[in-house]
Structures are given as C-alpha cells and as structure tokens.
Amino acid sequence: MPPQAGGVAVVIPALNESESIAAVVAGLPRPVVDRVIVADGGSTDGTIAQARRAGAETIEAGRGYGRACLAGAQAADDADIIVFMDGDGADDPAAIANMVAAIRSGRYDFVIGSRARGKRERGSMASHQILSGLVAGALIGLFYGVRYTDMCAYRAIRRDTLLALGMRELTYGWNLEMQMRVAAARMRVIEIPISCRQRRGGVSKVSGNLSAVLPAAAVLIRTFLRLFLTLRRAQAFK
C-alpha cells in the first residue's frame, strides 16, 4: 500500500552501517511510521542491501551527513513530518511516537531528543559529546533564547518547516545549523529525554577516535560562527 499524504517519514543518513541498519529499520514502530528512507552516503559494506532487505527505501545521496539528511527529506515528498535518526542503533525507536505526537499537537514546531537528560548506557556517549552539546546549547540560549542540552540527531519537524529554514550545511554541522535556525526563527521547541544505547556495530564517524573528533569539532565551530554572522546580517536588514 502506498504511503498516505500527511504521514511520517523516518530519514536515516547512513555510511557503512551494515552491522546495525537492518535492526534499526526493523525496530521502527510501523503503526506510526509510513515511510523509511535510508539516505546512503557512499557505503561500501552492503548497507544499502541490508536496509532494503529490512524494508526501507534507499537513495544514494552522496558524501556528507547534511547532504544525506536533506536528500532524504526531499525524497519524502508525501510526508508531513520528518523524523531524523542515526543508523547505528543508538537511538531508541520507542521515542518516535512521542516526538510525532508533540508535533501533531500543534504546540511545537521542533522536537529534539536529549541524551543528556535521558538514560545512557555506559559507553554510549563520550564526555566530549555531552560537553559540546551543553556548550552549544548555552551559546544558542544566550543569543537566541532557546537553551538545548544536546545536539542529538534524533529529532522531528514538519517537512515544509524544515525546507523553509534554508539549510545550507551539508556536513556534520547540519544538526547544529538546524537548531540555530529554529531558535533564531523563534519556533516552539521541546526537548524530550531519550534513552541512548551503545552503537550496535561499526565505528562512529565523529566520536570514535581523536582523528575523527578534531575535524568534527572544527566543522561545528565553523558552522556556528558562519551561521551566527549570517543570521545577524539577516536580522540587521529586517
């Protein structure tokens, strides 16, 4: 049966997640989720085949975390709500129902999971991940009045709202950019505490080791500064 307009699409950006992607797709609450789109960033380990066997649609998005997220959202052209989550198995799919309900209530425009406020398996998050989320949240709160506690990829937003944000960051700065643009636009935001599990396979692209952490940190700093200046200039012309 084709998905109905106004439904929910889960977009999963993935790069070499063959060890976990099938379980992630299979574990989604299908009474809530109408479409599952795995946006692949050039996997070489069979991620696409595993995702398809588990029942997901797949698209080849090209390299870049943000590029994959945007391509997945664009592909979900009949969805009303987009839920983003990672393909490593760390996100608890049980939270999707609450995220979707919060958007559908009409009280919130953006729902984001907070691992910092939820239960975390031992080893599921490095201390620098927790700290960076708190620091970014404090800065966004200082400048835009919305205080986040995490930069968690697990989030929900209406598709038309997302596409109207004017997202530009195509790498790992995507999540931070979305949070900044949402806050600057004075949208209604709620954080939902979520459980965080250890990844079910593979290696983190941004927190697995020092060689991954440092470039990711540079991307986040660059994204924050670039977007801060962009938003300030936009405000000056209003």
Image: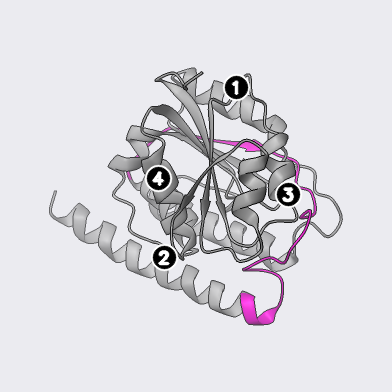
Badge 1 crowding class, 10 Å Cα cut-off, few under 14, some 14 to 19, many 20 or more, is: some
Between discs 2 and 3, the one toward the N terminus:
3
Between discs 1 and 4, the one toward the N terminus:
1
Badge 4 crowding class, 10 Å Cα cut-off, few under 14, some 14 to 19, many 20 or more, is: many
Badge 2 crowding class, 10 Å Cα cut-off, few under 14, some 14 to 19, many 20 or more, is: some
Q: Tell me the mark number nearer the camera, choosing from 1 and 2.
A: 1
Q: Residue furthest left?
A: 237
Disc 4 residue type? Ala
| Majority secondary structure of magenta residues | loop
Residue marked by disc 1: 32
The span shown in magenta is 185-212
Residue marked by disc 2: 224
Residue 1, position as x, y percentages in the image: 51, 18
What is the C-alpha distance between the residues marked 1 and 3? Answer: 20 Å
Instruction: Left or right? Give the position of 236 relative to 59.
Output: left
CB-based contact (under 8 Å), mark 1 and mark 4: no
Between discs 1 and 2, the one toward the N terminus:
1
CB-based contact (under 8 Å), mark 2 and mark 4: no
Return the residue nearer the eye: 189 or 178. Answer: 178
Between discs 4 and 3, the one toward the N terminus:
3
Q: Find numbered disc 1 in the image and state the secondary structure of the residue it sits on.
A: loop
Residue marked by disc 4: 183
Residue 192, position as x, y percentages in the image: 63, 35
What is the C-alpha distance between the residues marked 1 and 2? Answer: 34 Å
Instruction: Left or right? Give the position of 15 relative to 231.
Output: right
In the image, residue 106 sits, relative to residue 78, either above or below, namely above
Which residue is located at x 40 percent, y 62 percent? 170
Q: Quadrant of residue 53?
A: top right
